[in-house]
Image (cartoon, rainbow, N blue to C red):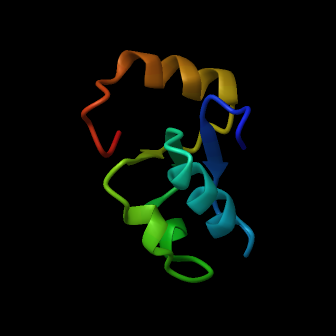
Amino acid sequence: MREADVLIVLLPGGYETQVEIGAALALEKPVILHTPDRKSLDTPYPCVFHYHLVVKILVSEIRNVDAILAYLSLCSKDSTVY
């Protein structure tokens, strides 16, 4: 995580996902949650990190990381939800 520029989480994640998000936040790394729909944010359980102020949320069925990064480069840093 220390070497990463950004953490991209493809939801739904497993139980370890919250640890990875927490570590990225502690290291002040950008966190992007990619979810196919809003329901996946709380499945299998709600995670407070999903709603942290600096976490960006991208709701899309496209699971291509290059497409996600290209889209995010067009978005404002100040936006919380894409």
Quadrant of image for the N terminus? top right
Tell me, yes or no, if residue 7 can be seen here. yes
Name the spot of residue 10 as percent of width and height, x first: 66, 50
**Residue 55 drawn above or below residue 68:** below
Identify whether 73 is placed above or below 8. Answer: above
The answer to whether residue 35 is visible is no
* The one of 27 and 15 positioned closer to us in this rendering: 27
Q: Quadrant of residue 2?
A: top right
Residue 23 vs 68, above or below: the answer is below
User: What residue is at 30 percent from the left and 44 percent from the top?
Assistant: 80
Q: Is residue 68 left or right of residue 64?
A: left
Q: In the rendering, at what x and y percent does residue 20 appear?
A: 68, 58
Identify which residue, 9 or 26, lies in the foreground.
Answer: 26
Left or right: 19 in relation to 22 = right
Residue at 73% across / 32% down in the picture?
A: 3
Residue 52: % across, % down: 37, 60
Whole-percent x and y of residue 12? 65, 64
